[in-house]
Amino acid sequence: MTQNRPWIPYLLILPSVVFLGLLFIVPLVQTIWLAVSDDGAPSLANMQRMVSDINFMQSVRNTFLLTIVVVPVQIAIALAMGTMVAKIGRGRETILWIWTIPLGISDLAAGLVWLSILQNTGYFNSLLFSLGVISRQASWLSYQTPVALFIAIAVAEIWRGTAIVMVIIVAGLNQVPKEFKEAAEIFGAGPWTRFWKITLPLIRPALQSALILRTVLAFEVFAVVYALGGRNFPVLVGEAYNWQNQNQNYSVAAAYAVLIMVISLAATLVYLKAFKVDPERLP
């Protein structure tokens, strides 16, 4: 059928191409042009204004620091959770459902949940006061306590985003043939050796996907930070939001968006190179 009508496959993918063109490619091109133009002419004025912003370097440092801390912790926790789930027989679906509850909560809602816990009159202070650990309310989310604020944001982001990493890793673990593990056990390999020599190499595609996804989302973190720290903890997306909504400068906001995109693409290329997957070595 398709041999007589070679245009049918192109007709079938046309709606998807139109959809991507209207809702992704066109806005992307417009955003890039808005960032690198001034009064309709190519210009780097918006980039220079972004770099000279008083919060620029701090937002870059905070975003990278949050990514460097959060992503490895999430991967480690997800690996531990996925390994435990793989060893469970009955009740596995229930445990997975409970662990994936944070996926059903929006970023802002997750931030508000942790705000109710960590604010001055929140549950955490109430618990410490009832135990006699503190004599009065302690401030954890103030500009005067930057370390506590960073830890609070990191913990909230780890709680919110680890579930998606775990789901990807569990999917990868399900693809590991049991014969490989059984053969390793016969030859006397211990649990740690089996994990490092067999499981980890075979789930490399899943790890690669999880790392790319979580790193890109970490560079785009905003709602949790905004709910817990507001302007006390500047991040790149937060600065883009402030330039667009408070300063009404869409060009500088577009410059921030382009910078985030470039950083995300660079991180993706690094992961693709560092965790290169050889299809011939996969089961």
Image: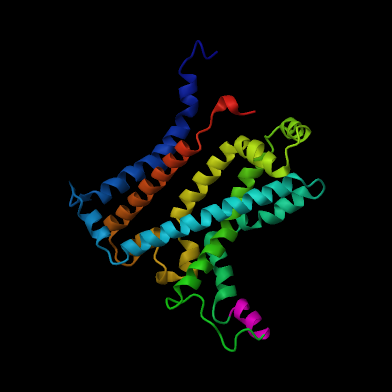
**Measured from the top left, where is residue 247 in percent x and y?**
29, 66
Q: Residue at x 57, y 59 (%)?
A: 158
Magenta stretch encompasses residue 124: yes
Which image quarter: residue 196? top right
Q: Position of residue 140 (x, y in %)?
A: 51, 76
* Residue 134 visible, this angle: yes
Q: Nearer the viewer, residue 26 or 144?
A: 144
> Could you say where residue 141 lies in the image, as x and y percent from the top left?
49, 75
- Residue sticking out furthest to the front: 188
Quick check: 38 left or right of 136?
left
Q: Tell me which residue sits at (62%, 58%) in the image.
A: 102
Camera-side residue of 16 and 108: 108
Q: Relative to residue 265, is residue 69 drawn left or right?
A: right
Q: Main secondary structure of the magenta part?
A: helix
Using the rendered image of the protein, determine whether residue 241 is visible from the camera's viewpoint: no
Q: Residue at x 73, y 33 (%)?
A: 184
Quadrant position of the C terminus in the picture: top right
Q: Nearer the viewer, residue 245 or 54?
A: 54
Horizontal and vertical percent for residue 60?
36, 59
Q: Quadrant of residue 131?
A: bottom right
Range of the magenta residues?
122-131
Residue located farthest toward the right when viewing the structure as drawn: 90
The residue sitting at the top extreme is: 4
> Which residue reaches farthest bottom?
135
Is residue 25 located in the magenta-colored stretch of the structure?
A: no
Q: Where 85 falls versus 174 (above or below)?
A: below
Q: Quadrant of the N terminus?
A: top right
State how the image is colored: rainbow
**Is residue 227 placed above or below 69 in the rendered structure?**
below
Q: Residue 22 occupies which quadrant of the picture? A: top left
Q: How many marks?
A: 0
- Considering only vertical position in the picture, is 77 above or below 276? below
